Amino acid sequence: MLIRHVISHYKINYFWRQSIRFNSKVPTTPIPTLEKQDHSKVTIDNNTISLLERLSLVKCDTAEGVKALEDSIAFANKVLHINTDNVEPLYSVLENENLSLRPDIITQGNCQKDILKNAAVTEDDYFVAPPGNIPLHEVELEETEHHQQKNEN
Amino acid sequence: MNKLSSLTIKQIHQAYRDKLLTPTSFIDQCIEKTKQTKHLNAFVTVTEEIAENHGMESEKRLYKDKKMKALDGISVGVKDNFCTKDVPTTCGSNMLRGFRPAYDATAVARLRGAGACLLGKCNLDEFAMGSGTVDSIFGPTRNPWGYDEQDWRITGGSSGGSAAAVAAGAVAAALGSDTGGSTRNPAAYCGLVGLKPTYGLVSRYGLIPLVNSMDVPGILTRTVEDAAIVLNCIAGPDDLDSTTIKKEFKPVSIKEDFDLSNIRIGIPKEYYCEGMSEEVVDTWRKVADLLENEKAQMRSVSMPHTSISIAVYSILNQCEVASNMARYDGLQYGLRTDKDYSTEELYASSRSQGFNNVVRSRIFTGNYFLLARNYEKYFMKALKLRRLVSDDFAKVFDKDTGVDILLTPTTLSDAPLYSEFCSLHNRDQCARQDYCTQAANLAGAPAVALPAALSRRRLPLSLQLTAPPLAEDLLLNVARQIERLVNFPSATASQTLEKLNISASTLPSASRGLLARLAAAARGASPGPLGPPPDPAGLALRRAAATAQALDDDYQILTLQHKIKEVQLKINRNAKFISSLTSTLSEARGGAGAGVAGGAGGAVERLAADLRAHRHKLTAYKDSADKAKNKYSALEVPGELEPGVLREGCARAAAAAAAAARWARAAEDKECTRRLRQQTLKLQLS
């Protein structure tokens, strides 16, 4: 039926019926990477690990965690050989845009309840923290012992 | 209909106007859909009550105020790293389990301002760190394409929940976030359009930060036009985010007849990397050929630093993560353990419990790169390399010597199986998954992933377009043309209606019933991509699809027949008018004859005026008859089906016109005679 023909014509998926010319600008083989294929192993010493733990305030002392760190460093090392002499660092892609700050006018307030509502522990109108100014000594000591044990094993 | 689920925003709005659908009933269906697709794990929180309220508000605006906002009654999902007032916002992490923000993110607030109905918060990799949506405390999200309970495919990530929700038809659009490809990657694996706007075009206020210098809110929809509609609602300067571009945002407008012949499209050869599947490269070639057929100017271009960008991205990502994650200390919000020996101990234990190993490892590595002794070697080096990558874009988009837009693949393959994906570590996976996508983030350029074809496994394959910063209009218009050329989503009934310029409300009730059934069938059936028929459910779906197809055809025939009737009605009306006109003319003729015979000049003048008026009316009616005929012929109905009445009508119109001309001439003659007679009289008198 003719009307049917009109409809089906409208629906034909041209994509796969088109003859494929393949003379396009897409390359025929993968383009080699500029990354340096260096397989030398990166190892991080225990002091660095405990320094990072203190800075990061997270534990990452498992063998798996250390390996992930070492792998990430090895991955980063692949591009350090690229020459960047006289190249300025790019901090923000909007470096040429005129970004403005809003006027220093109070636009919000009376939201004490909102601000406190997500804190696990509050007292009166305050957030509550344990005693400060105590470095993460004990944790660090435990870590060191743990690492030594691991090394002895 | 080889696409999971259903209607575009325009179609939904048309259905609202035609009263085939109401916002509340549509939202109910969406909620129902989230329940039916619970196994996909697309949502972290389904905000059923909120969605219903929003739907009611839309309905009120629509039927009481008779006004409809751009997204009224449109269901949306929001990735769970956007703050939503009083709705849990977890980032897929134990750290923020139960966190309820006191405010809405700007992108969310603008969606709401445009009338969108919030259906829920979507799953993601913890703190958006990943490319599979497998690392969430709520479990992995499953891809609706090629779904099999035993061995399902990942959605990609990190906005996988948003993608699954749109692909499954639970929402019409969803917000994702895009730091290195987190919107485009899941869009590619789920057969959707995934838009990453220019950095700074859409406000990040309330988007929980991952990498401040690269994060952008992303948009996931089923069509390019929908993405443009959502973008127009959320883009533009925001006082609450100092990194939004302060220029006024010019809304994107999609032109169906966009001319590709002036567009220079670049194929950056470095995007063909080791490990890219043959199918992806073939699709890339086919679409490049299609564009060349459309007279677009295709050029091979080089962006030499593409292959190192992924490592640069990885360094910068981890450095900024280390800094950004410092805010989670368990005091003001978030998980707090009961260690209370010291503040630092509380911090360390809360953070170790709250973060998964991927997040912890990125913080750790970031801090390593930021150590005083490594700062220059890694962090500054990466920033300099970032400029090289960004300069590649600037050069390739040069106004005189460059191209207007880049065409590349989005991912290296179709969606991997969950088991395959998990065999690699998170960072290795990200290096593989984000290869084609993250460079646009380093340069801040807008990019869109769009489905181009189905792979041999009947899974979506996707291509990516990248444009210069703030060229969203060009980007989406070219994307629309590709969408049209590859015809990934097939035409639906309402598109056909739109094409025929018919409003569904004029249809006979039987057709309307059919349309409703069709819509229901389309929503219920997810036919195309279900692979070889493995189970009764698959077969049932196929049958449903076939029924829907048959209904679709029948329905379209009905609409055509109805249109014919409508046109005939108009023609009859015209014919009636023409005959009344003829009778008036003959009366006038009688009057004029008498007038001339009586020598009364006034009658002739009246006759001339009458004639002018009739001639005017006649031209108007001829025009409308022509229009009707044109409209009719635009339907592409062959000549033999053209109703005789139309031809008759036209013939009669022509005859009437001839008669009118004849009478005009007669009137002029008479007028002339009268003047001559008067002159003769004057002469005789003188």
Image (cartoon, rainbow, N blue to C red):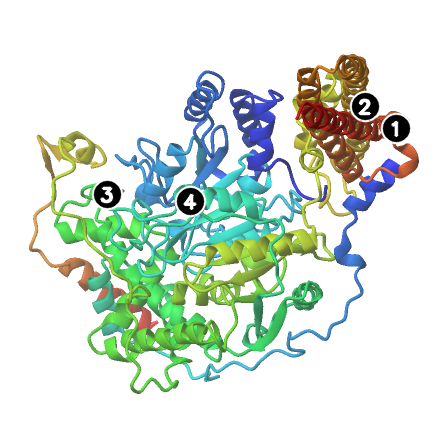
- Type of amino acid at the residue the image marks with label 1: Pro
Quarter assignment of residue A70: bottom left
Which residue: 48% across, 57% down? Answer: B131
Which residue: 50% across, 32% down? Answer: B74
Q: Name which of mark 3 and mark 1 comes first in the sequence.
A: 3
Residue A1 or B305: which is nearer the viewer? A1
Q: Chain of mark 1?
A: B
Question: Which residue corresponds to mark 1?
Answer: B643
**Marks 3 and 4: same chain?**
yes
Q: Indicate the secondary structure of the residue bearing disc 2.
A: helix
Q: Indicate the secondary structure of the residue bearing disc 1.
A: loop
The percent coordinates of residue B360 (x first, y second) are 33, 58
Q: CA distance from mark 3 to mark 1?
A: 82 Å
From the viewer's perspective, tell me whether residue B202 is left or right of residue B546. Answer: left
Q: Indicate the secondary structure of the residue bearing disc 4.
A: loop
Q: CA distance from mark 4 to mark 1?
A: 66 Å
Q: Indicate the secondary structure of the residue bearing disc 3.
A: loop
Marking on residue B549: none
Question: Which residue corresponds to mark 3?
Answer: B337
Marking on residue B568: 2
Q: Is B579 located above or below residue B624 in the figure?
A: above
**Marks 4 and 2: same chain?**
yes
- Type of amino acid at the residue the image marks with label 2: Gln
